[in-house]
Image (cartoon, rainbow, N blue to C red):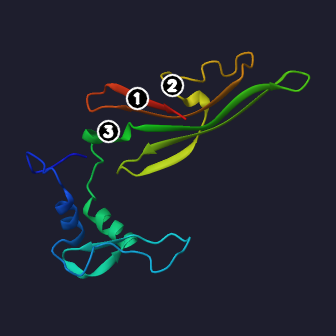
Amino acid sequence: MGASFETAPAANSIDRIFEAFFQNNSTGPRQSFPACDTADPIAAAWRTPEAPGYLVPADQALRLVQDRADIDISGPEFNFVRSIRVFDVRYARQHESGRDGDCNRSATVVLGTYGTQGDFAWQRSSITALPSAHIGLERWGQNCPSIYHRSVFVDWRDYEGNYGFEQVNY
């Protein structure tokens, strides 16, 4: 990310890389490697300064982080978190088919929202629930023009109530 305590970075950063791997520990890098070739995923490991003699499994490390990050965000000053909505238009297709010119429409849209304490959840949604700022499905339902669309649309209100959004088509 380019963050550094040094005002002028050294021309060669190889020393810093080795410092990060070894951290004054002559036993080797602080990274776990698989003992054999396998196609199965291997759980990541994390070593704490308080317990340098063993590795902490990834799920336990996650629990430690979650325990430390637990704060109360139920107050109105955190409404901006609860205002964030994530629309995932996974599939939207409209086209004519058959001799009769029937219009076939199908769509899969889900909406992700944040709860009182910042818990995130997905739920089914629809194209009609998309905000007017969303683009790409304006002619949905009109005389059956051919449409194929996929996107992620995020909108929010900041702490002052100003509306913002971002859309990524894929």
Residue at position x 31%, y 78% from top? 55
* Quarter of the C terminus within the rendering: top right
In percent of width and height, residue 59 lies at 39, 70
Q: Earlier in the sequence, mark 2 or mark 1?
A: 2
Residue of label 1: 165
Identify the disc placed on residue 134. Answer: 2
> Dot 2: what SS?
loop
Foreground of the two, 167 or 142:
167
Disc 2 vs disc 1: Cβ atoms closer than 8 Å? yes
Foreground of the two, 97 or 34:
34
- In this rendering, the answer to whether 64 lies above or below 121 is below
> Dot 3: what SS?
helix
Identify the disc placed on residue 90. Answer: none
Residue of label 3: 79
In percent of width and height, residue 83 lies at 38, 36
Circle 1 residues within 10 Å: few <14, some 14–19, many ≥20: some
**Type of the residue with mark 1:** Phe
**Type of the residue with mark 3:** Asn
Foreground of the two, 33 or 161:
33
Furthest-bottom residue in view? 53
Residue at position x 25%, y 39% from top? 77
Disc 1 vs disc 3: Cβ atoms closer than 8 Å? no
Left or right placement of residue 73 versus residue 106 in this view: left
Q: Earlier in the sequence, mark 3 or mark 2?
A: 3
Foreground of the two, 41 or 92:
41
Furthest-left residue in view? 7
Eye-nearest disc, 1 or 3: 1
Q: Earlier in the sequence, mark 1 or mark 3?
A: 3
Circle 2 residues within 10 Å: few <14, some 14–19, many ≥20: some
> Dot 1: what SS?
strand
